Image (spheres, rainbow, N blue to C red):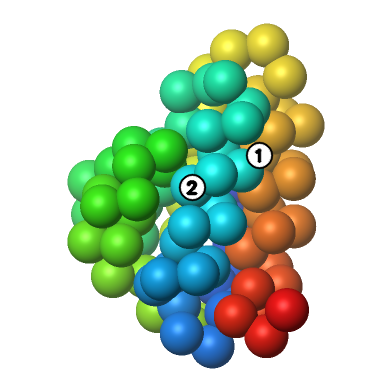
Amino acid sequence: MARRTVTIASSVGLHARPASLFVQAAAETGLDIEIAKKGEEPVDATSILAVMALGAEHGQEVELTAEGDGADAALDSLVELLSRDLDAE
């Protein structure tokens, strides 16, 4: 299982537009990807409701996990995405 930790850069956290962009990118990988705040249960990264309910805010660290062929590359691209302020683009 591939695993990455990233700090949420979007000023509004994973809410609305940033969450939508992240979920779309996660779904496009075709892999089973989960996202979790430290110490909390992971949620399906391809579910907009689950990701928004996670309540990840600006500056918080989240952990991404993925399984399957290409998991490392997929997580690297998702980390890069979350490392940008998606609400400012």
Sequence order check, earlier mark of 1 and 2: 2
Position in image of residue 72 (x %, y %)? 71, 29
Residue 86, quarter of picture: bottom right
Please state which amino acid type lies under the numbered disc 1: Leu
Horizontally, residue 62 falls left or right of residue 38, namely right
Q: Label 2: state its secondary structure.
A: helix
- Could you say which is closer to the camera, residue 1 or residue 13? 13
Q: How far apart are marks 1 and 2 (CA)?
A: 13 Å
Residue 71 versus residue 9 in the image, above or below? above
Nearer to the camera, 21 or 84: 21
Category of crowding for the residue at label 2, using alpha-carbon neighbours closer than 10 angstroms: few (below 14), some (14–19), many (at least 20): many
Residue at 53% in and 33% down: 27
Left or right of 13? Residue 49 is left
Q: Looking at the rendered structure, which numbered label has been put on residue 23?
A: 2
**Mark on residue 75?**
1
Residue at the (39%, 72%) spot, across then down? 15
Residue 37 lies, in percent from the top left, at 35, 60
Question: Image quadrant of residue 5?
Answer: bottom right
Secondary structure under the numbered disc 1 in the rendered image: helix
Q: Dividing the picture into quarters, in which one does residue 44 lie?
A: top left
Amino acid type at image mark 2: Val
Observer able to see residue 39: no
Task: Give whichever of 47, 3 is nearer the camera.
Answer: 47
